[in-house]
């Protein structure tokens, strides 16, 4: 009986390995297909091409600003949603997840209709239409996406925070806001930072919403994903591959940082 059970278990594990091997092969294949292009010529192209330099600076600059804005929007919003019972809270919670599930082009079109010169916001701020199709449009699109990711991550973190610490701080005379600044954020900064890194990586790779809201103009609104798109469309595969290699390098670095943080966090909790 035991031998039969072990045999069935071994067979099941072997069968389960097949999808893993297929999936892993596809992922490794896509990575190697880019890395194998990295010879001396491509290395010089990546390091010294002016268009790639511009796209890299634009991607890093706008994504950092977008992350800062997302932190200002998402962290307080997540804290309020985890602390206060609001009317229609489930509806609000669902709406705040929409940026993560909407197709990026639909997101970009919605933002374009909101921010253009005929949009609702132009009635309040007449000059707001001038901000689109510029780096400001990139920041708006990236912030919209990054805020939703960071909000969902932070909501989960704050909702499982030990209530005992909050009650103790209230008994010591701290207000809820002081508790957030002095107790919760110092204790939760590592998982919050991990969520911020994920949001930042999504902002760097944002394409669809950025295309709709900021346009695709070389040396103006050209981020790394936009450089891939523009140069594939024009047939310049060298620049497109160079931009892809930069994105691959940034992604690997961010994943490496996340793995280190998760390992240290697990060591502390254990």
Image (cartoon, helix red, strand yellow):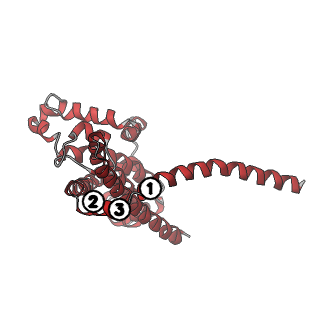
Name which residue lies at 36% across and 50% down: 202
Residue closest to the eye, 88 or 133: 133
Name which residue lies at 14% across and 41% down: 131
How far is mark 1 from mark 3, CA to CA? 15 Å
- Mark before the other along the chain sequence, 2 or 3: 2
Say which of marks 1 and 2 sits in front. Answer: 2
Crowd rating for badge 1 (residues with CA inside 10 Å; few <14, some 14–19, many 20+): some
Q: Residue furthest left?
A: 127
Crowd rating for badge 3 (residues with CA inside 10 Å; few <14, some 14–19, many 20+): some
Residue closest to the eye, 264 or 259: 259
Which image quadrant is residue 235 in?
A: top left
Asked whether the viewer can see residue 168, the reply is: no
Say which of marks 2 and 3 sits in front. Answer: 2
Task: Name the residue beneath numbered marker 2.
Answer: 45
How far is mark 2 from mark 3, CA to CA? 51 Å
As drawn, 235 above or below 185: above
Residue 121 x/y as whole percent: 17, 34
Residue 221 x/y as whole percent: 20, 46
Local SS, label 2: helix
Task: Name the residue beneath numbered marker 1.
Answer: 157
Which image quadrant is residue 85 in?
A: top left
Relative to 147, 52 lies left or right: left
- Mark before the other along the chain sequence, 1 or 3: 1
- Mark before the other along the chain sequence, 1 or 2: 2
Task: Name the residue beneath numbered marker 3.
Answer: 179
Name which residue lies at 61% across and 51% down: 20
Local SS, label 3: helix
Name which residue lies at 39% across and 55% down: 198
């Amino acid at each position: 009986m035991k031998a039969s059970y072990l045999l069935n278990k071994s067979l099941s594990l072997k069968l389960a390995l097949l999808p893993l091997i297929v999936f892993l092969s596809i992922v490794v294949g896509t990575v190697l297909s880019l890395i194998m292009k990295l010879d001396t010529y491509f290395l010089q192209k990546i390091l010294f091409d002016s268009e790639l330099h511009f796209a890299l600076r634009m991607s890093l600059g706008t994504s950092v600003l977008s992350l800062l804005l997302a932190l200002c929007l998402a962290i307080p919003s997540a804290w309020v949603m985890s602390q206060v019972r609001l009317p229609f809270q489930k509806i609000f919670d669902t709406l705040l997840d929409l940026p993560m599930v909407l197709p990026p082009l639909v997101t970009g079109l919605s933002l374009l209709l909101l921010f253009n010169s005929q949009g609702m916001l132009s009635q309040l701020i007449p000059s707001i239409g001038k901000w689109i199709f510029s780096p400001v449009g990139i920041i708006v699109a990236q912030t919209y996406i990054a805020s939703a990711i960071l909000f969902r991550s932070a909501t989960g973190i704050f909702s499982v925070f030990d209530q005992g610490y909050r009650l103790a701080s209230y008994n010591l005379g701290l207000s809820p806001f002081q508790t957030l600044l002095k107790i919760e954020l110092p204790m939760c900064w590592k998982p919050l930072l991990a969520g911020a890194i994920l949001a930042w990586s999504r902002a760097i790779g944002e394409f669809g919403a950025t295309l709709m809201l900021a346009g695709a103009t070389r040396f103006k609104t050209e981020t790394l994903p936009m450089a891939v798109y523009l140069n594939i469309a024009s047939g310049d595969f060298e620049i497109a591959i160079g931009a892809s290699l930069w994105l691959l390098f940034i992604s690997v670095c961010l994943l490496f940082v996340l793995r280190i943080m998760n390992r240290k966090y697990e060591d502390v909790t254990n």
